[in-house]
Image: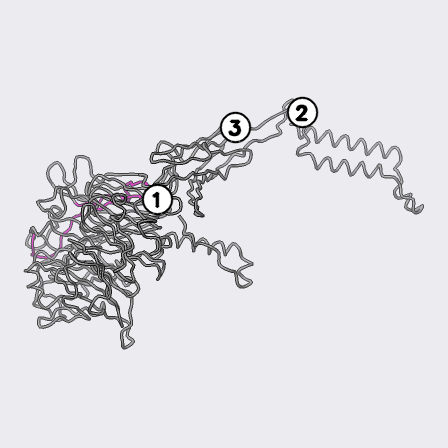
């Protein structure tokens, strides 16, 4: 769906007015850019993991309230939704038309595609090979009762023929062997691409946990893919966490080429030690524009003996803030930071790696120096702000870091912050959502804003919606039963705009899930639960919305011969209490054909309303009678000839009389005879060369046509419009 502000600007300059085609091209680019700006294709919106949706023109602090905003629908799935739901706009689904699509992955190893505006299921696939099941919980309650897809997938709309979803799934076979597999799914069908799935297998030089004496071995049974996948420069980066703290395990990051799923890089960050996994409470690996990756590692071995360059002598980085370089296609530690008491924190399970890193936009400090910063926090309640150009490494006497705020957070962090317009928003476990202000490229040491409500374990991972730098809203989910979606004014967190308990049970959407983060796109908010996803949006104007699509039993294309009627089955569905009449039109029918929708208007209910689109074509017709259609050129010639011979002579002079006098009788007869011959020839040619049957109507022209069926509903000066594209072939 295109944004409503895709309009032409005022023309200035002669060159613009002379090139309307170029203007249309620019207009298309602007609209496509706006459309794609609504997409949420990776964890927390972008690789910096800012959580910002900055093209939101529908939701504002003025209309997000319990009167105008609420639950539109809820989709149910076959397992827990631990991965953040993702959103792609204007996706063409074969035989089902074009849809905004919500992608949902479950711990039952399933992936669903839903119409993001109505909740209608478009497709569903299982990632389980024959004879396999989703994994058991491996004796750990962190993800229970089953483990399938835990990490948020990543989508590349330019990959493959139709765009690709990259996703890691865990399973168990009939021999009780466990598997981790990387899948690449066509986003329009869910079909496997690029020879996938690819079994995750790896070794790395080292003598740490699960080593054969020379290499540590990746054991798929000992890990789950908890952090969101990172898609960076056509490479998919996966990273793995343990089941609780059950050994043996180490810190793996494994990379794959997105076009053929070949493994291109393996890095272990505790190869000669143990633990130090990557889990970050589901946060995705963050990356900057220079191709650097920033994981926060969990408690584990850190070598306090350093080499000459200040790096751990045995390459063990447990409980550290690490910068990985991907220069020249490699994957290696380029810099790091860890606190002076890192060993004590690891021993106390106060790991930095319970939170995710956020890459901040460039900032200018008090001396006019541009700073490239990254922020992170974990269980020790300290805010760590690192300079990406010099992270600080390890100093046993005192922390060497750009800025840190000890006890700056009232509780531990189990998730991600969000960033917007010079502010950093954190949701500590068991405490209020708080905002910190940046000033001269440093954080003020105390929060500038706070919510009145506290968020129990694990706290909250906030997301931001805004229209550029205005109309900003902070969204956060409370992990309770039922779950609660909150919306706050980003400029003042004490102003709660909405929560899903304000309208009684109307907006309740299921039991909470601990690490889920809201997804905001195109006027709607999506929140995962233990058994589905709740969808929220505006209820004002016509209450709720309606959806229009091709019936699941029908097709979006038809082929007929001239004279036949093509028929298409459509479905109409209401959501969010929509109860208005919808009128239908059909455009794009070819010449000598008509298109109709039955019924021509309807008021949808909670169940699907069936519609029938009929396109009646015309067969060629033939007749033996003379038709003058197509013979007007002959008629004109004859009339001119007759006019020339019948015109009376002028009387102005003898000379004129002789010029315009009637021709001799023989000339007159010749002209009449010539006209008669011309008329006979034309008649013979027009009527098929003298045969008894002569075709006069060719019928509907053969060829391929695109039809557009549009449903419109107007109420209270608001118009809702949805369209379905159909294909017609006449042969």
Counting from the top left corner in percent of width and height, residue 623 is at 63, 24
Report the residue marked by disc 3. Answer: 563
- SS state under label 2: loop
Start-end of magenta stretch: 180-209
SS category of the residue bearing label 1 = loop
Residue 61 at x, y percent in the picture: 33, 56
Q: State the image coordinates of residue 479 (x, y, percent, origin top left).
A: 19, 50
Is residue 155 located in the magenta-colored stretch of the structure? Answer: no
Graded by Cα atoms within 10 Å as few (under 14), some (14 to 19) or many (20 or more), the crowding at tag 2 reads: few
Q: Earlier in the sequence, mark 2 or mark 1?
A: 1
In front of the other: 539 or 267: 539
Circles 2 and 1, Cβ within 8 Å, touching? The answer is: no
Q: Nearer the viewer, mark 3 or mark 1?
A: 1
Residue 433 is drawn in which quadrant?
bottom left
Residue at (66% x, 30% y) in the render:
686
* Helix, strand or loop status at disc 3: loop
Please, is residue 557 above or below residue 65 in the view?
above
Q: Which label sits on residue 117? A: 1
């Amino acid at each position: 769906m295109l944004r409503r502000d895709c309009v032409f600007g005022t023309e200035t300059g002669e060159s613009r007015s002379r090139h309307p085609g170029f203007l249309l091209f620019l207009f298309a680019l602007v609209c496509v850019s706006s459309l794609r700006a609504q997409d949420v294709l990776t964890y927390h919106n972008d690789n910096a993991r800012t959580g910002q949706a900055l093209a939101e023109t529908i939701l504002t602090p003025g209309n997000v309230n319990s009167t105008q905003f609420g639950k539109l629908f809820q989709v149910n799935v076959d397992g827990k939704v631990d991965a953040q739901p993702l959103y792609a706009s204007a996706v063409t689904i074969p035989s089902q038309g074009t849809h905004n699509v919500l992608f949902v992955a479950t711990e039952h190893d399933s992936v669903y595609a839903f119409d993001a505006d109505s909740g209608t299921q478009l497709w569903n696939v299982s990632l389980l090979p024959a004879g396999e099941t989703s994994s058991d919980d491996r004796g750990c309650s962190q993800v229970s009762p089953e483990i399938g897809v835990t990490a948020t997938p990543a989508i590349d709309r330019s990959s493959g023929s139709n765009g690709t979803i990259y996703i890691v799934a865990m399973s168990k076979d009939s021999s009780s062997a466990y598997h981790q597999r990387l899948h690449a799914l066509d986003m329009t069908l869910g079909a496997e691409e690029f020879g996938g799935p690819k079994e995750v297998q790896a070794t790395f030089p080292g003598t740490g946990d699960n080593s054969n004496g020379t290499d540590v071995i990746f054991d798929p049974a000992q890990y789950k893919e908890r952090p969101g996948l990172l898609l960076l420069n056509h490479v998919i980066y996966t990273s793995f966490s343990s089941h609780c703290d059950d050994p043996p395990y180490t810190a793996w990051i494994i990379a794959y080429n997105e076009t053929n799923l070949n493994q291109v890089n393996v890095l272990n960050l505790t190869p000669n030690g143990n633990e130090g996994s990557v889990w970050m409470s589901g946060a995705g690996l963050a990356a900057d524009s220079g191709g650097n990756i920033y994981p926060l590692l969990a408690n584990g071995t850190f070598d306090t003996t350093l080499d000459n360059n200040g790096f751990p002598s045995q390459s063990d980085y447990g409980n550290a803030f690490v910068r990985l370089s991907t220069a020249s296609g490699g994957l290696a530690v380029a810099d790091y930071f860890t606190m002076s008491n890192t060993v004590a924190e690891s021993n106390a399970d106060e790991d930095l790696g319970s939170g995710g890193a956020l890459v901040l936009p460039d900032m200018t400090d008090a001396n006019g120096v541009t700073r490239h910063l990254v922020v992170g926090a974990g269980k020790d309640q300290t805010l760590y702000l690192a300079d990406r150009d010099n992270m600080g490494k390890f100093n046993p006497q005192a922390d060497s870091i750009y800025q840190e705020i000890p006890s700056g957070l009232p509780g531990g962090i189990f998730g991600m912050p969000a960033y917007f317009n010079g502010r950093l928003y954190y949701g500590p476990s068991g405490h209020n959502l708080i905002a910190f202000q940046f000033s001269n490229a440093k954080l003020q040491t105390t929060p500038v804003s706070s919510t009145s409500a506290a968020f129990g374990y694990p706290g909250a991972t906030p997301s931001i919606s805004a229209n550029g730098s205005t109309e900003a809203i902070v969204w956060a989910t409370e992990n309770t039963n039922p779950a609660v979606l909150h919306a706050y004014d980003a400029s003042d967190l004490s102003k709660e705009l909405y929560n899903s308990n304000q309208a009684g049970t109307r907006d309740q959407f299921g039991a909470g899930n601990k690490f889920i983060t809201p997804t905001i796109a195109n006027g709607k908010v999506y929140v995962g639960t233990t058994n589905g996803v709740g969808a929220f949006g505006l209820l004002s104007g016509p209450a709720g919305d309606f959806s229009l699509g091709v019936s699941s039993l029908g097709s979006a294309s038809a082929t007929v011969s001239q004279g036949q009627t093509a028929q298409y089955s459509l479905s109409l569905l209401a959501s969010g209490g929509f109860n208005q009449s919808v009128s239908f039109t059909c455009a794009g029918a070819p010449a000598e054909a008509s298109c109709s929708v039955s019924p021509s208007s309807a008021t949808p209910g909670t169940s699907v309303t069936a519609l029938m689109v009929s396109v009646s074509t015309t067969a060629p017709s033939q007749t033996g009678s003379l038709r003058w259609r197509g013979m007007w050129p002959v008629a004109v010639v004859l009339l001119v000839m007759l006019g020339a011979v019948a015109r009376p002579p002028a009387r102005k002079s003898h000379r004129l009389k002789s010029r315009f006098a009637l021709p001799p009788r023989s000339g007159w007869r010749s002209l009449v005879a010539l006209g008669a011959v011309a008329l006979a020839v034309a008649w013979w040619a027009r009527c098929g060369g003298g045969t008894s049957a002569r075709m006069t109507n060719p019928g509907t022209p053969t060829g391929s046509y695109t039809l557009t069926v549009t449903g419109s509903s107007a109420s209270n000066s608001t118009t809702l419009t949805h369209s379905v594209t159909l294909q017609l072939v006449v042969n």
